[in-house]
Amino acid sequence: MEYMATVPDKYFDLAVVDPPYGIGIVQQMEKTVASKSSMMKGSNGITGGHWDDAIPKKEYFDELKRITKNQIIWGANYMSNNIPFNSTHTIIWDKENGENSLDNLINIS
């Protein structure tokens, strides 16, 4: 946010972003890993941190829109309430992972 505040309006042609989805994936993965093998814990880079506990605030998307001409936002379905602009194109990536909801809505503006 500090850097984006220094960037002129529409400076970048395109932003491709994959913001945190706010689903607490680190804690989910730690539980899965711990239940399968304590040996894996800590060696696969998924332990620790709360970087995915919340989605970016609306101010992040306001700044993103201000400094870029076009945006591709992965996982937009998780943060649609905070995205202050309408998408002109949407791609849905169904990862076909069985019974879970691990699909992503990709906003392209």
Image (cartoon, helix red, strand yellow):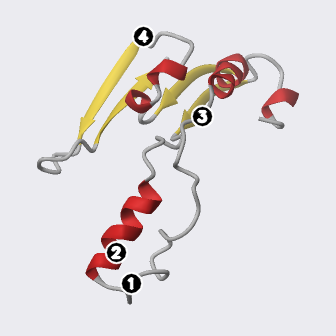
Quadrant in the picture for residue 102: top left
Tell me where residue 76 appears, x and y as whole percent: 43, 29
The residue pinned by badge 2 equals 33
Circle 2: residue type: Val
Q: Earlier in the sequence, mark 1 or mark 4?
A: 1
Q: CA distance from mark 3 to mark 1?
A: 30 Å
| Lower sequence index among marks 3 and 2 | 2
Q: Nearer the viewer, mark 3 or mark 4?
A: 3
Nearest to N terminus: mark 2 or mark 1: 2
Q: Tell whether label 1 touches label 2 (CB within 8 Å).
A: yes
Q: Which mark is residue 56?
A: 3
Q: Which residue is mark 4?
A: 88
For mark 1, what is the residue? Answer: 40
Name the outermost residue toward the right: 6
Give, as a three-letter code, the residue at label 4.
Thr
Q: Earlier in the sequence, mark 4 or mark 2?
A: 2
Residue drawn at point x = 44 percent, y = 61 percent: 27
User: Which structural element holds mark 3?
Assistant: loop
Q: Secondary structure at mark 4?
A: loop
Q: Considering only order in the chain, which callout, 1 or 3, is on the residue closer to the N terminus?
A: 1
Q: Marks 4/2: CA distance?
A: 39 Å
Q: Nearer the viewer, mark 4 or mark 2?
A: 2
